[in-house]
Image: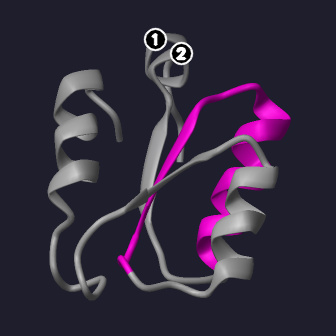
Amino acid sequence: MSMSAAELKAGVIAASAGKQAQGVAYYAQRLGVLAFIGIPEFPSYTKVEGVKRLDAEAILDGETLEEPGSGAGLIEQERGLQ
């Protein structure tokens, strides 16, 4: 995936209940990009802490990944994230 400088400055957003969340957070941190990760409301504590340790924002919203999280969706719209 290729992103412009303006897109990178805005940050990235992803939805995940596990390892993908930490992978996105890891690479965002390495690139100096803000990361917002939508995670179901009742995740494992270690997964949320792993995301936070990598300086990403964990947005706990929705019961499953299939249920679009309103919190993550609002941030996506406000910041024009991809």
Determine the secondary structure under disc 2. helix
Q: Are marks 2 and 1 in contact (CB under 8 Å)?
A: yes
Reply yes or no: does residue 37 show up in magenta.
yes
The quadrant where residue 63 appears: bottom left
Q: Amino acid at mark 1?
A: Ala
- Looking at the picture, how far across and down is residue 35, in whole percent? 56, 41
- Residues at marks 2 and 1, CA–CA distance in whole angstroms: 5 Å
- Looking at the picture, how far across and down is residue 82, in whole percent? 35, 41
At a point 51% along the width and 84% down the height, the residue shown is: 43
Question: As drawn, is 46 to the left or to the right of 17?
Answer: right
Scheme by which the image is coloured: one colour
- Residue identified by numbered label 1: 6
The quadrant where residue 60 appears: bottom left
Q: Amino acid at mark 2?
A: Lys
The quadrant where residue 50 appears: bottom right
At a point 68% along the width and 52% down the height, the residue shown is: 25
How many other residues sit within 10 Å of disc 2, few (<14), some (14-19) or many (≥20)?
some
Asked if 81 appears above or below 42 in the picture, the reply is above
Determine the secondary structure under disc 1. helix
- Looking at the picture, how far across and down is residue 22, in whole percent? 70, 66
- Residue identified by numbered label 2: 9
At a point 85% along the width and 38% down the height, the residue shown is: 30
Question: As drawn, is 64 to the left or to the right of 10?
Answer: left
Asked if 33 appears above or below 64 in the picture, the reply is above
How many other residues sit within 10 Å of disc 1, few (<14), some (14-19) or many (≥20)?
few
Of residues 77 and 5, the one nearer the viewer is 77
Region of the chain picked out in magenta, as a range: 20-41
Question: As drawn, is 69 to the left or to the right of 19?
Answer: left
